[in-house]
Amino acid sequence: MSTAIKCFQLNTGAKIPSVGLGTWQSEPGVVGHAVETAIKVGYCHIDCAQVYGNEKEIGVILKKLIGEGLVKREDLWITSKLWCTDHAPEDVPVALDRTLQDLQLDYVDLYLIHWPARMKRGAARFKPENLLPADIPSTWKAMEALYDSGKARAIGVSNLSTKKLGDLLAIARVPPAVNQVECHPSWQQTKLREFCKANGVHLSGYSPLGSPGTTWLKSEVLKNPVLVSVAEKLGKTPAQVALRWGLQTGHSVLPKSTHEARIKENFDIFDWSIPDDLFAEFSSIEQARLIKGTAFVSETYGSYKTVEELWDGEV
């Protein structure tokens, strides 16, 4: 009998649902329908961010579904993220208030610092001259105040290397509950995952299917022969196996889709499991990071001169 793995417990005591709908690159006009479909299928975890530019539309749908009694607010898990232009301590609460207004909510279940990089207030474009030196400790202090206020029931980070997470844990009054990072069979994050586990930080995996819909990325994650072979043996799709691998590895997964059939398929991963012998095959997969964060790297501006510095060698 396989274990369903429906949720993971955070260091706050809260339980984060193990599968969330990702909304990055979900266009306005379609994201609302995707969220509605997902909630009707059984998802209760929606992963948002201010920079995705679609929180208002998601808010309209959440209000509608809660108003219709289809779902209760307390049964939903809504994550959002602080964008790089809002790292100044005085801007952090304003940014969350804007997100809460857009999502039409009184609180988010999880609020993350989106990247360990800072940009000028109001900067709309990824230009090197818009980068400023990051000051994660002062931004984190402002995040802790949001946690104290109850507007963010949990706080965390995204795209932090093992070293940067360790540095934050050393100074944090409220330790981060989550580090949301790229994680899939072709970028398994073994070192970071072990560090998170040892320090009570939950790892949440974005792009768990390798972002197959992203035009500027050459992603072959779902075509990996190990994944394809395991999927054939289990009578599942490569996407389902990649997601189930994540759950059995111990992290939540955030597959993005706006297609009803795939939203359903991505949620059908609870009543079966990957047996140990097949699970062991995943360790042979060649590793490569897809999301490199090159927009935050500059010889002249910001905190990171190279991609290696951004990830502290975890490339």
Image (cartoon, helix red, strand yellow):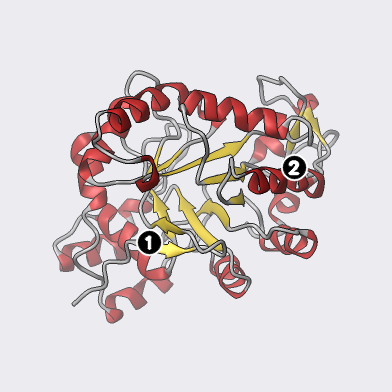
Can you say whether 185 is above or below 50 in the image?
below
Disc 1 or 2, which lies upstream in sequence?
1
Residue matched to label 2: 142
Residue nearest the viewer, comparing 27 with 90: 90
- Which quadrant is home to the C terminus? bottom right
Q: Is residue 244 above or below residue 82?
A: below
Image quadrant in which the N terminus is located = bottom left
Q: Which mark is residue 198?
A: none
- Circle 2: is it few (<14), some (14-19), or many (20+) Cα within 10 Å? some
Q: For the view shown, which residue lies furthest in the bottom direction? A: 277
Left or right of 300 in this view: 263: left
Q: Nearer the viewer, residue 105 or 210?
A: 105
Q: In this figure, which residue is indicated by the disc labeled 1?
A: 7
Q: Nearer the viewer, residue 18 or 78?
A: 78
Q: Position of residue 134 (x, y in %)?
A: 80, 41
The answer to which image quadrant residue 46 occupies is: top left
Q: Is residue 181 visible?
A: yes
Work out how far the residue at label 1 is from the one at label 2, CA to CA, in angstroms: 28 Å
Residue extending farthest to the left is 235
Residue 305: x and y in percent read: 80, 43
How far across and down, in percent of the image, does residue 302 sit?
81, 37
**Residue occupying image coordinates x 36% and y 27%:** 63
Q: For the residue marked with disc 1, what is the amino acid?
A: Cys
Q: SS of the residue at dot 2?
A: helix
Q: Amino acid at mark 2?
A: Ala
Horizontal side, residue 167 vs residue 232: left or right = right
